[in-house]
Amino acid sequence: MIRFSHVTKSFGSRAVLQNLDLEIHKGELTFIIGKSGEGKSVTIKHMMGLLQPDSGQVYVEGVDVAKLGPNELLQVRRKFGILFQQAALFDSMTVEENIQFPLREQTNFTPSQIEHRVEEVLRQVDMPHSNRKYPDALSTGEKKRVGLARALAAKPQILLYDEPTTGMDPLISEMIDALIVQVNQEEKEITSIVISHDLKAALATADRIIMLYQGRVELAGPPSVFRNADSPVVRQFFSGKVDGPMEFL
């Protein structure tokens, strides 16, 4: 579904991506992990054409994103749905209006089709009958669910999760992790990408894990590969022991 070929990206004198090669497989749930500054967010922005590589190619379904014009790039971006870290709901809109927003902007759905789709995705995230509520009446976990419903509304081919469980208590985190797996299983054609530092979730739920280190892929494979990894970098990351403070994007 997505492939990076020899991608390099620098900001001033700082090289963030260095000859990066990676693949995201269609229909899989992939976690991208790594400590702060290793290029996770920059990698995601390249996928959507929000950043252009200094060199190399970024392919989405075989199309080199860097070579697209504005209109073609817009069509590629519409393949993506995003669950933002803080859900990013519009406070002045009801749950229903928040979910309707991408449908009105990105589709030609009729009003009745929009209403049906809103009800459909709210059932999918186990939030039926919440249409008229405003975000300030929702718990943190409920906001995440509504954010996911909005991301799913326009039926994206690729679903991005930006640190979906950061700052949540363990019970809510497990609920969100289970929901991510459920969505990936129900939506057979969807490709899910999770940016995360939640190692427990990655090992328990991912089909594939990609670890970035110094702008390259340190290791990629199913969770079993990471559990048995000999790489000192991987072992250090999984033990949580680093030289100096460790922060995550």
Image (cartoon, rainbow, N blue to C red):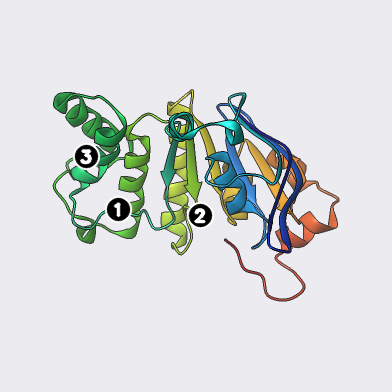
**What's the residue type where badge 3 is placed?**
Pro
Q: Is residue 222 toward the left or the right of residue 161 in the image?
A: right
Element assignment for label 3: loop
**Percent from the top left, x then y, of residue 170?**
47, 60
Nearer to the camera, 202 or 84: 84
Nearer to the camera, 248 or 200: 248
Cα separation between marks 1 and 3: 17 Å
The furthest residue to the front: 69
Rendered residue at 36%/53% (across/down) = 87
Q: Is residue 11 toward the left or the right of residue 92 in the image?
A: right
User: For the residues carrying marks 2 and 1, which lies nearer the camera in this image?
Assistant: 1
Cα separation between marks 2 and 1: 16 Å
**Percent from the top left, x then y, of residue 216?**
76, 49
**Percent from the top left, x then y, of residue 3?**
66, 32
**Percent from the top left, x then y, of residue 109?**
23, 24
Disc 2 designates what residue? Answer: 163
Badge count: 3
Disc 1 designates what residue? Answer: 89
N-terminal-most mark, 1 or 3 = 1
N-terminal-most mark, 2 or 1 = 1
Q: Is residue 45 toward the left or the right of residue 145 in the image?
A: right
Q: Is residue 204 visible?
A: no
Element assignment for label 2: loop
Q: Is residue 201 visible?
A: yes
User: For the residues carrying marks 2 and 3, which lies nearer the camera in this image?
Assistant: 2
**What's the residue type where badge 1 is placed?**
Leu
N-terminal-most mark, 2 or 3 = 3
Whether label 2 touches label 1, CB < 8 Å: no
Nearer to the camera, 65 or 42: 65
